[in-house]
Amino acid sequence: MSVDEHRVALAKSWSAREILAHTRRLVRTHAFRLAALYLLVFAASVLGVLLFVYGTSANFVERQTEATLDAEIAGLAEQYAQRGLSGLIQIVAARSAGDRGDAMIYLVTDPDGRPLVGNIAAWPAGLPTHSASLSFALEKTIDGRVEMRPARGRLFLIPGGYRLLVGRDISDAAAFRGQIRSTLIWAGLIALGIGVAGGAVMSRNLLHRVEQVNRTSERVMAGDLTDRIPLSGAGDEFDQLAANLNRMLDQIERLMTAMREVTDDVAHDLKTPLSRLRTRLEGALADSSEPARAASSGQKEAIRAAIEEADRLLATFNALLSIAELESGARRDRTEPVDLSEIARAAAELYDPVAEEKGFALAIAAEPGTTIRGDRHLLSQALANLLDNALKYARAGKIEIRAFVEGGRAVLEVADRGPGIPPEDRETVLDRFVRLEASRTTPGNGLGLSLVRAIVRRHGGMLVLEDNDPGLRVRLEFARLAL
Amino acid sequence: MKILVVEDDRETATYLTKGLSESGYTVDCAGDGREGLFLATSGDYSAVVLDRMLPGMDGLSLLGALRAAEIRTPALILSALGSVDDRVKGLRAGGDDYLVKPFAFSELLARLEALLRRGAGPTTATRLRVADLELDLLTRTVRRAGTVIEILPREFRLLEYLMRNAGHVVTRTMLLEHVWDYHFDPQTNVIDVHISRLRQKIDKGFDHPLLHTVRGAGYCLRASE
């Protein structure tokens, strides 16, 4: 497999994974769930309506059959009452004669069950001779073929053991019922199809607009404060939401600008007097006039110590300003492809002699492919801060710098063999001015890790503190830059 | 040599004027951006020390106007803003170096002198020499009194920078910037050990040390008298 083919295969497996991830994301969305629920309710109501239509129309035909049979029986019973058995037989014979096309069945039997008159040859097999309302199958010969056809009937018991059967072939009604059923099933399927399509369009539309809001907020969080959510112009709830969010972003942008201005002003206003203080101290130290030269060496030492103190104060101030500026995160115009392995190698080269001097063994493992998009100087500063910390707190032992790729992410890691940080303190230690030793004897301002976190966040990365067993392992994870 | 100082803070201006005069420079001072631009375009200065925040016209705009007028006087920007972003902005606007306030005067002087030397034109020499120490830029070899000294690549660059600035003070921050391309000061003093290792290689066993530590300022490579 050539390198190119390998790359293509890799890209394909990625896209399959992406599709899966995309589907999973879709299923989790509110819009999708709403559409699914809507579809469910819609399907249930369509099903209800269709069942109702089916039930009533099928019943209507059935009731009509029953009513006809009842009327027929009632009429014949009246005839019998007026004209007796022979009159009844005459009428039945008249009605049975010929095919009137109304599918009526008549049969009169004597007490022994022999047919006297009617349009069927014999008492249907298995038909009880007592109950008043009957369902039975009728043998009928059509074009030489014998067919079993469903029928409904009424029985009229004539005194003296004679029986009158009035029935109706309901095969047409059954066919009608089947027709209705298939029509309704088709109607249901079509309605369901329209429902699914409508739901999909609706959720897509909804998703698209939510996605717009999402994408804009992501870009804003990434530092592009000027981005705004596009309005569809429909003036609906989404437009109102977008307009409100946009107004909020305007306000945030105004505040951020104001904050930056204030920060710059504070830097200027507070650092100027501090600068003067330092300048005066330095001037006093360099003063070559006679009384100044006579100053004791103790006084000069005191001035040097005061200058150092002022420098520390200023360093703290500078670190705070840097963090504030990184966290305001508006500018990212200087990003370029940066290889974390290069950063690691450069830092290792710079720190190796001093580490050795302090009794540490500095080891470096840098893998290829750890290129990310970022600011080289800031990333170097983050790594330098981690190394400063390791040299400060770990006392002695091995310090490892590693740059590698894991799970598609580029990782820069510094691990020492010092006392480490207990799990419960790992979150707070990233906050400003937090230092874990109660005595605060080690020099430092408690801003080192805060600055590292600000730098990592500015790169959209993640800072993880782990146990190196023993010691502390700090992982900086970033999105890899595909080359 | 004439230096122009554009600084609105009177105290800093006085301090700079005094210090630079004592170091043998002629100093003109401007209190705001417009006056600074006027002086810079009319006078013949070897370098400009420029505050970034000025009344009337800020330092970067002044610098932009100056560079637009094809005036290439080396400029050292002073600023209370110390982040890498600000530094890069300053350098992009046409500044040649950037120093965060407050600064030790020795740091400013070292940087200013480095700018003035650079203004004299780049050296095309392939061989640098200080006393009996020789550095060959083509073969990347170092000799002292004719003996080849084994040296690591980064030590070579460190030595090269020191030799190019021979006789002048070079601060730790300058070394971090020019040799390691680190534009911030690590908390650990990483430079001293590099220097002492280099010193081991070039000075050990010789009667006259060349690499000197200047207290409170930095280092200096020079032939001892």
Image: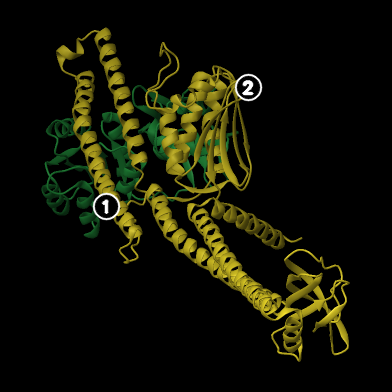
Residue type of the residue flagged with mark 2 = Asp
Query: Which of disc 2 and disc 1 is earlier in sequence?
Result: 1
In front: label 1 or label 2: 1
Q: Name the quadrant of the N terminus of chain B.
A: top left
Q: Which mark is residue A469?
A: 2
On the image, the x and y values in percent for residue A384 come to: 48, 32
Q: How many marks?
A: 2
Q: Name the quadrant of the C terminus of chain B.
A: top left
Subunit under mark 1: A
Residue type of the residue flagged with mark 1 = Arg
Q: Which mark is residue A110?
A: none
Graded by Cα atoms within 10 Å as few (under 14), some (14 to 19) or many (20 or more), the crowding at tag 1 reads few
Q: Secondary structure at mark 1?
A: helix
Q: Nearer the viewer, residue B119 or A131?
A: A131
Q: Which mark is residue A247?
A: 1
Q: Is residue A481 above or below residue A390?
A: below
Q: Report the coloring of the rendering.
A: by chain
The chain displayed yellow equals A
Q: Residue at x 58, y 24 (%)?
A: A416
Subunit under mark 2: A
Locate residue B213 relative to residue A468 in the image: left or right.
left
Q: Colour of chain B?
A: green
